[in-house]
Amino acid sequence: MSIGERIFTALLLAYPGSFRRRYHKDLIAFFRAERRNPLYADGIPGSVRFWRNTLSDLARVAASERLAPIARHLQRGHAPRSTRSGQPSRPRAFAGVDTLTRDVRHTFRMLARSPGFTALAVLSLALGIGANTAIFSIYSSVFLRELPVEDPGSLVEIYTQDSEDDSGLQYGPSSYADFVDLREQTRDVFDGMVLYGVTVVIHEVGDESELLFGEEVSADYFDVLGVRPALGRTFIPAEDGAIGASPTLVVSHSFWLSRLGGVPDVLGRSIRLSGHDFKIVGVAPAGFGGMFPLQVEVWFPITLDPLLHPASTRLESRGNMTSWIKARLKQGVAAQQARAALTVVSARIAEQNPETNATRKAALVPTDQVSLHPQLDGVIRGFTVSLLAVAGLVLLTACTNLASMLMARALARRREIGIRLALGAGRLRLVRQLLTESITLALLGGLAGLGLAYWLIRTLLAVRPPIMVPIKVDIGIDDKVLLFALVLSVLTGVVFGLLPALRTTRHQLVVALKDEYGLTEGRLRRVGLRSSLVVAQVAVSAVLLVCAGLFLRSLANASGVDPGFTLREGVVATLELSESGYGAQERRALLDELRTRIAVLPGVESVGLCDRLPLGQSLSVTEAYPETPHVEIDEDGVDVDIATVDTGYFRTLGIPILFGRAFDDTDRADSPPVVIVNRTFATRFWPSESAVGKLVRVHGSDAAPSMIVGVAADGKYRSLGERARLFLYEPSGQRPVGLAHVVAATSGSGEELLQPVRQAIRGLDSHLPILDLITFSQHMDLMLFLPRALAAVVAGLGLLALILGTTGLYGVIAYDVSRRTREVGIRMSVGAQQSQVLRLVMWDGLKLVGTGTAVGLLIAFVCTRMLESMLFNVSPADPITFIAVTVLFLAVSLAATVKPAKRASSIDPVEALRCE
Amino acid sequence: MRRSKPQTNQQVTPIGFEILLSLTRGPQHGYGIKLDIEERTAGQLSLGSGTLYQAIQRLERSGLIAEAEADDESRDARRGRYYQLEPAGRAAVEIELRRLHRVVEYARSHSLLSDVETS
């Protein structure tokens, strides 16, 4: 079922049950047929027209069906209105667009008259709708993403399952060699099988370089998927055969537009990727961004892999399982049949390659059952759906508030409405007018919310996630999201407008004109409904605020941790040297020269080099065998974290050397191997004596022993929350580095040093790939990225819920008080004191908040356990947070009830009784 | 103008009348009725699903049309239910056509329709 059909099916709920049940299937059949109507076949404009027509028809008929009994009653005896000539006849109660225009005009006049109310209403709706829309657009980009390929229904995913693999990955990627065998031997069930793997390449233009996502694909990738190039051609089979044949590539449409000017003569031109020239043979169609939800910009044959990654074993080794497989089922072949064939073939491959494939088999899942990955989908869906649920609750809160406000406004307008009813206005006409008001408000709110969602998404995508490659996740406001926002707005308008509208127009004329509204019906039942809404609001905001509080505390704790180094202002340049065509000797010379050039830049205090930054993304672990009499070391050694650093590293980062010395120029390849250990390492293996001068074998029990020349202070290496960890440094003079982080400490600001450092690197070698060039504080910010983002999002939602909950509480109490004027008057005339009335009203408010807070805290207590892994040094049942939230709610609820309570207690009993 | 008031008149709306007119050609499903009306009115009257089935509901309740039995092999069940004219519906069409005919005759004899005047 298409997304549109699902929405339509859901919208059918607008019809009365009897009508819906009778014609459900027919309406859907009609919808399907109409969707294929050539009238609407011109893309997005057609879709817009289709939905406009469908929705206006639905709204009109639903309203007239719902209100038909009232209409019949109220219009009996009225003269039928004339329809405008030439206009196709519509049900009489809904004659003509002119009434609607009048209503909308009237609405805008009403809204302009009370700008405060309008602003508040639009703002709270905008927040609610905006949050929902933003989250929906994320959901949509992952789960409602349609693969931009021909006939996705006949595609299947093929994964490798390895029973020996203990990583828990049941649907793993496959190796190139396995793919070739599978493709050869399953031609009877598949019309084609393609292999693709994501890769990162460095695109060089002049002195600048940027990282791009690329896909390495088998040559028939585009043909099998049915993707036709916008320009030129895709790959031909010959490009699959010869390993490392003349490099060709296909670029994405957006790359073509943004980097190549969108001119047609790009075919045959070369662009430079990761140090090699590639000839452009084609441009992919607009909107095609590969198989991952990433913006892939270039495609090249997987057989070019050795060229780009000289050390990679992607093509030869069956152990290198880094590529994904899709296949197209032959016409008439069921997935089950193909699965059986795959099982046979993969068993055969396992027989021929027992050492690698003995425990492997191929698994097949139809593509339309997979969004990202069979094992991930559930988790991500659960996460976004629960976010959507939270945002939905926030919106519901906004709705109930607006309903309260409208109810209060209706009280003020009861005379206007009474008079209009007395003058013969149909009830239907008035309900329609009031609904027009609320839907207009909601649409205004939706428009503002869409703007907000757009801004939220932009902000979200602009935030640099803590990884080096530029993720271009394809989240945006497309027609699905627009439709979602529109439907949500209209529904919101109906939800918060219908009840007040029906209520306002229900009462009898005489009562309304005599200003005795509200006395003719019992109070308790309706207040009960509204009260439970307030309780729910308070509970929701309590849960959100507890979560927000926990994240904020966690953030504060994380920012306060001593990372073990003192560097704050500086620059980190990350260079990839192993793929730049330099040998080990040249690399060392190059880095030496680079350090010298950076060291003389103005403001630079010292320069250091390492292959792994503390709190960075790379991680290396090795086995060490300390020669110590104090601790038993078994044959596997001990696992230690390790980094290769140069002579300036400790000084630059500001890591104190506690005993011994730092590395110096005497630590060369031809001198005896040395290492520096951290304090944890030293005291663990030599608890009672100095570790300096002791021996340790690194990388294996048969390695030559290295002498410990220094002991460095402990620090945080992988994350701020970790416990003390064993760490070991090796000198770059004895171990060449591949990936190099060059760190420069400055007395000025890191920001100002970025450009000079870039120029220094470019001056040395304009083709040297700079993977990353950031300030050191940016590097540190990445560590705090997740806690900050979580705290900001949850705190924002919690605050929103708190504001909405408080105004809701205020609305309920104020409304209640205004209805109880007479009761209060009677109480006071029989001797109740002002203070007693004050207490009575405030007690009513506190009961609601108390119940809500208690429920919320209880839910929070149960739920926050799930956050434990994301918290830093904070217990999920952190008493401070829970107490703070409770106090906050009591204070806020007192504030919200004080004003109405004061008003109630200042009622003059005589006036109160007389006016009724 | 005097108007006779037949016993079977059910106050057929213009949309209802168009539907009845379409069904004079034989049983048809909802979307088929819509297409037929569009063709006949040269696109002047294009019905949405709600409007169409609302009118169908009224006609069914008045006994002017009824669901057709699905005996025909050529029918496509996915299109939804088929409807056919009841005797009362046929009568209603006739009454309305006669009324329209009288109106047109009157208009002709008084030269009110100069531009459409034909022999």
Image: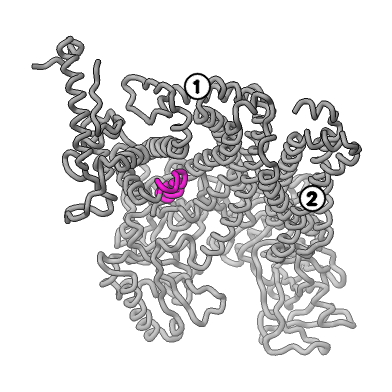
Q: In which quarter of the image is residue B41?
A: top left
Q: Do the residues labelled 2 and 1 touch (CB within 8 Å)?
A: no
Residue type at the position of mark 1: Arg
The residue where tag 2 is placed is: A847
Give the x, y percent position of residue B91: 19, 35
Magenta range is: A5-20
Residue closest to the far top: B110
Q: Where A872 sits versus A410, above or below?
A: below
Residue B85: numbered disc: none
Residue A102: numbered disc: 1
Q: Provide the secondary structure element on which disc 2 rests.
A: helix
Give the x, y percent position of residue A46: 36, 37
Residue at image point 46% right, 47% down: A13
Give the x, y percent position of residue B5: 25, 26
Q: Does the magenta stretch include residue A13?
A: yes
Q: Is residue A434 left or right of residue A712?
A: left
Q: Where A311 sits versus B25, above or below?
A: below
Q: Residues within 10 Å of mark 2 (few under 14, many from 20)?
A: some
Q: Where is the N terminus of chain A found, in terms of image quarters?
A: bottom left
Residue at image point 75% right, 68% down: A722
Residue at image point 78% right, 71% down: A723
Residue A255 visible, this angle: no
Q: Provide the secondary structure element on which disc 1 rests.
A: helix
Same-subunit check for callouts 2 and 1: yes
Residue type at the position of mark 2: Lys
Q: Main secondary structure of the magenta part?
A: helix
Q: Which chain carries label 2?
A: A
Toward the viewer: A847 or A517? Answer: A517
